[in-house]
Image (tube, rainbow, N blue to C red):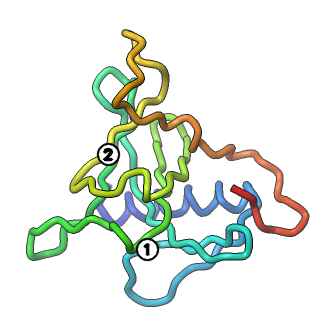
Amino acid sequence: MTSNEKGARTEGAVLSVLLHEGYNVLLPFGVSRYDLVIEVEGEFKRVQCKTGRLGRGGGSLEFNVSSTPPDGKARNYDGQIDYFGVYLAQQGQVYLIPAEELAGLQREATMRLGPARNGQSKGTRDARPYLLDPMACSSEDGAAVS
């Protein structure tokens, strides 16, 4: 699968789950640093879709928090997006993670999918609170509250 095909599949999965969660979703026209826009409590929020992967041992979610243009210098999204929409294809899951939770990271984020075997929680990021339900019912007013 090409990089473009993988990106399209990820964006489609995130879009689908956001719609099932009841979000109003807008698709930007043109070139931008974000893929989707959602309405949250009457405000528009920018979403950058990323393809997640299972970390070593399957206990973590990993995804890129930057893009690499043709010049080869990675650029993060600090101040340019509000959320990462992360699709973990191996588990069919979508996470909506506030970008501020990952501010300052340059290349990759790693988040726990479950508790650490050794019980450590300090210094770890938990992905579970950001998991979206792919079968959620839409709200009556069409805008999810988060």
The residue lying at 58 percent from left, 38 percent from top is: 129
The quadrant holding residue 142 is bottom right
Residue 65, above or below 57: below
Residue 120, above or below 7: above
Which residue, given by chain and number where applicable, does mark 2 sit on?
Answer: 109
**Secondary structure found at label 2:** strand
Using a 10 Å C-alpha cutoff, classify the residue at mark 2 as few (fewer than 14 neighbours), some (14 to 19) or many (20 or more).
Answer: some
The residue lying at 34 percent from left, 48 percent from top is: 63
Residue 116, above or below 145: above
Going from N to C along the chain, the mark reached first, 1 or 2, is 1
Which residue, given by chain and number where applicable, does mark 1 sit on?
Answer: 34
Residue 115, above or below 50: above
- x and y percent of residue 57 in the render? 32, 20
Question: From this viewpoint, which residue is outermost toward the top?
Answer: 118
The quadrant holding residue 140 is bottom right
The residue lying at 87 percent from left, 69 percent from top is: 141
Along the line of sight, which residue is nearer the eye, 116 or 62? Answer: 116
Q: How many marks?
A: 2
